[in-house]
Amino acid sequence: MSDVASAESPGTPRRKHRHDLGHEDHGPTVSAGVTRAIQGLLGLWIALTLALVVYALVDASRPAATPPGAPAAQTAP
């Protein structure tokens, strides 16, 4: 087979593919902004979830608070 694509004429420089030029894969260019916004929201969701897990672990490792009206814990003299 020939090394020349059907849209190119022999002897002309090869044209770069749209992926090589930095264009989007498919769809309108507006979808690029939507995709980035969705990725940002997902990243924020993951970060907030990790922060909540860390908070829950720190809160669970704290000693239990003494309920009001209960006698305070006695310390050895």
Image (cartoon, rainbow, N blue to C red):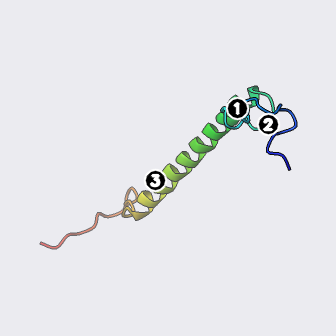
Horizontal and vertical percent for residue 42? 63, 43
Which of the two marks, 3 or 1, is nearer to us in this view? Answer: 1
Which of the two marks, 2 or 3, is nearer to us in this view? Answer: 2
Q: Mark 3: which amino acid?
A: Tyr
Horizontal and vertical percent for residue 5? 83, 39
* Dot 3: element: helix
Q: CA distance from mark 2 to mark 1?
A: 9 Å
Residue depicted at x 70% and y 32%? 23
Query: Between 42 and 57, which is closer to the camera in this rendering?
Result: 42
Q: CA distance from mark 3 to mark 1?
A: 42 Å
Q: CA distance from mark 2 to mark 3?
A: 41 Å
> Which residue matches tag 2?
26
Residue depicted at x 43% and y 57%? 59
Q: Mark 1: which amino acid?
A: His
Residue depicted at x 41% and y 58%? 58
Question: Which mark is on residue 23?
Answer: 1
Graded by Cα atoms within 10 Å as few (under 14), some (14 to 19) or many (20 or more), the crowding at tag 3 reads: few
> Which residue matches tag 3?
55
